Amino acid sequence: MAKEIYALGEVPPLGEVPERMHASVIRAERFGQPRDAFAIEEIPVPTPGPMQVLVYVMAAGTNYNNVWAALGKPVNVIGARQRQGATEDFHIGGSDASGVVWAVGDQVKNVKVGDEVVLSCAMWDEEAPDIKAGADPITSSSNKIWGYEENWGSFAQFALVDHYQCFPKPKHLSWEAAAAYMLVGATAYRMLMGWPPHTVHAGDPVLVWGGAGGLGTMAIQIVKEMGGIPIAVVSEKERAEYCIQLGAKGVINRRDFDHWGRLPDIDDADAFGKWMTGARAFGAKFWEVLGERKSPKIVFEHPGEATVPTSIFMADNSGMVVICAGTSGYNADVDLRYLWMRQKRFQGSHFANTEQCTALNDLVAAGRIDPCLSATYTFDQVGESHQAMYENRHAPGNMAILVNAPRPGMTEMP
């Protein structure tokens, strides 16, 4: 007879699903600082539907979306789901994971019980009219991010996903390294390779904001892998060498410039002139680091409000600024003259589709992209890992959390 609940690190017989599990849970009454918002509770184990997969989570990744979930802003994810009919009054976050398939719905064909997998975070309704009409599923109106917009994420002993979210775990990686790369890596891959004709080609200079962060570390490696020339931007000189080791040709320290933020009104000649002086100096530094007077073919954006005006200015004629976030704010100004007269592209990008996740995963499995794991936390430190990210005091690269894996460095089930 199956036990009602298993302790963390106590492995059930393969395929045996207990009634309850340990989960690091956010509740609305705890919204606030991430270290205080998460608490370990006992929660019923979800039951997979016909096309769903229950995964025994070995390790989970830390991403900024669950900093937002912990704060309860800009969106109360619990309330948003309840308004759509959800009954759970809690949030189990976590949008990256590695683990073992533990149960499958009766229509699942791509994985079986016992398979070792990594999980992607995009969910969509495969029967949605726009997908049926041929839309890229990641652009579907039904698309949501698992472990943020959707519940039953990876900060629990068991996670519930749709079948297409499962990809083979690279065998050489530890559980924690395997849990650290998919969200940022696939996001970066789509940004750099998913918007033809603006994809990375041999010799293309690419400006990468936040080069030592999770997204930036993936972007540097992908650009290098595709034959491009990554130039990274960092905010601390100590992180420059890390970017160089990943493949960046050079690094620009953002703190050497002070023109960041909203674009001044062009009618304010003094303020606008000062901003232009700063932007041109930044451009000159890019040329210096690159070693020639060429502008970036692609600008890899995610800070948003603080940097978009400079990114639009910097992009080459008919080049592209591609953005996936707004970590410094959402109100980004654009000087439209540069956008239309020099025929630049300003492209939004959101995670990745199944094919792009597969392409990224294949690069990792082949050892050509490193997950850049920088820190590993224990399960009772889920809140602390997000607090470190919130305060920007985490090490360069990506963070992971051991869930059922009893210790770091394991590549197989205990």
Image (cartoon, rainbow, N blue to C red):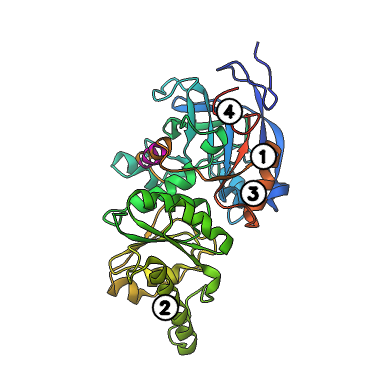
Res 280 label: 2
Q: Which amino acid does label 2 sit on?
A: Arg
Identify the element where label 1 is drawn. Answer: strand
Res 46 label: 4
**Dot 1 corresponds to which residue?**
25
Percent coordinates x, y for residue 345 in the rendering: 32, 64
Q: Can residue 38 be seen in this view?
A: yes
Within the image, what quadrant is residue 308 found in?
A: bottom left
Q: Residue at x 67, y 39 (%)?
A: 25
Identify the element where label 3 is drawn. Answer: helix
- Which of the marked residues, 4 or 1, is nearer the chain's N terminus? 1
Percent coordinates x, y for residue 216 in the rendering: 48, 54
Nearer to us: label 3 or label 2: 2
Q: Disc 3 and disc 4: Cα gap in Å?
A: 25 Å
Q: Disc 4 and disc 2: Cα gap in Å?
A: 55 Å
- Tell me if residue 15 comes above or below residue 297 in the rendering: above
Magenta span of residues: 356-362
